[in-house]
């Protein structure tokens, strides 16, 4: 069997609609990364692999976008431990949910493992989109600057309370 499994005992929350202080978000994210780092069992396998993150919690999240976003910190730390970018095409990320006490189950599969074979079969039916090349490869043309317009020096009519006031001094030394 070509699989590494370990469990990270952290609580995950959907941060996309959460209104909280940025330091509270940072503290939770750092705690999830630190817990993943401490429990990391090591890796010496090939580069092409499948990583399944299973969120174990009493409640469930929408699997479309809320489930992956709730485990973003753990995904980042797993990718860092693999010495890869989490957007690398060498790693396929699969998400799942289960009912139970709050934790995240991390599984790395490669070769002939059942999870890796299932993902390869799914990719054969509907392959993932190809990676997008970075924008930095194509240089941008410099923008043309517009000439600055001259400032108007005409006086504006007074509005509001300023129009009602009668000044004791007016420019030019004339009295009202």
Image: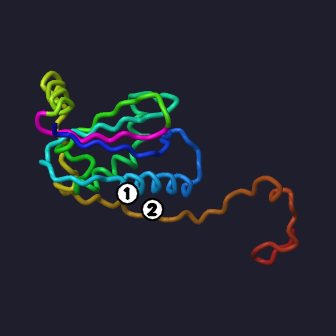
Q: Position of residue 159 (x, y in %)?
A: 76, 54
Q: Which mark is residue 116?
A: none
Q: Give the main secondary structure of the magenta stretch.
A: strand
Q: Is residue 111 magenta?
A: yes
Which of the numbered marks, if any, corresponds to residue 38? Answer: 1
The quadrant where residue 127 appears: top left
Mark 1 neighbour class, 10 Å CA radius: few under 14, some 14 to 19, many 20 or more: few
- State which quarter of the image contains the C terminus: bottom right
Residue 78 is left or right of residue 174, and the answer is: left
Query: Up-down: is 112 above or below 38?
Result: above
Nearest the viewer among 133 and 53 is 53
Compute the Cα span from label 1 to label 2.
Answer: 61 Å
Mark 1: secondary structure: helix
> Range of the magenta residues?
102-112
Indicate the position of residue 102 as horizontal and vertical percent values. Answer: 49, 38
Q: Find residue 121 and report its horizontal and vertical position in percent.
A: 14, 25
28 left or right, relative to 55: right
- At horizontal 80% and vertical 72% (from top left) the residue drawn is 170
Eye-nearest disc, 1 or 2: 1
Q: Earlier in the sequence, mark 1 or mark 2?
A: 1
Residue 37, image x, y percentages? 36, 56
Q: Which mark is residue 149?
A: 2
Crowding around mark 2 (Cα neighbors within 10 Å: few <14, some 14 to 19, many 20+) is few
**Residue drawn at x 47%, y 45% as measured from the top left:** 10
């Amino acid at each position: 069997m070509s699989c590494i499994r370990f469990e990270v005992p952290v609580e995950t929350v959907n941060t996309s609609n959460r209104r909280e202080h940025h330091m509270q978000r940072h503290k939770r994210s750092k705690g999830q990364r630190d817990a993943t780092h401490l429990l990391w069992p090591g890796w010496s396998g090939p580069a092409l692999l499948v990583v399944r993150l299973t969120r174990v919690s009493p409640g469930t999240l929408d699997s479309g976008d809320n489930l992956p976003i709730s485990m973003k910190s753990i995904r980042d730390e797993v990718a860092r431990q693999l010495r890869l970018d989490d957007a690398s095409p060498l790693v396929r990320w699969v998400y799942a949910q289960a009912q139970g006490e709050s934790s995240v189950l991390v599984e790395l599969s490669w070769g002939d493992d059942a999870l890796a074979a299932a993902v390869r079969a799914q990719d054969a039916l509907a392959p993932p989109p190809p990676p997008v090349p970075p924008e930095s490869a194509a240089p941008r043309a410099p923008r043309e600057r517009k000439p600055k317009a001259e400032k108007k020096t005409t006086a504006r009519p007074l509005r509001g309370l300023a129009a009602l006031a009668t000044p004791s001094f007016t420019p030019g030394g004339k009295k009202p």
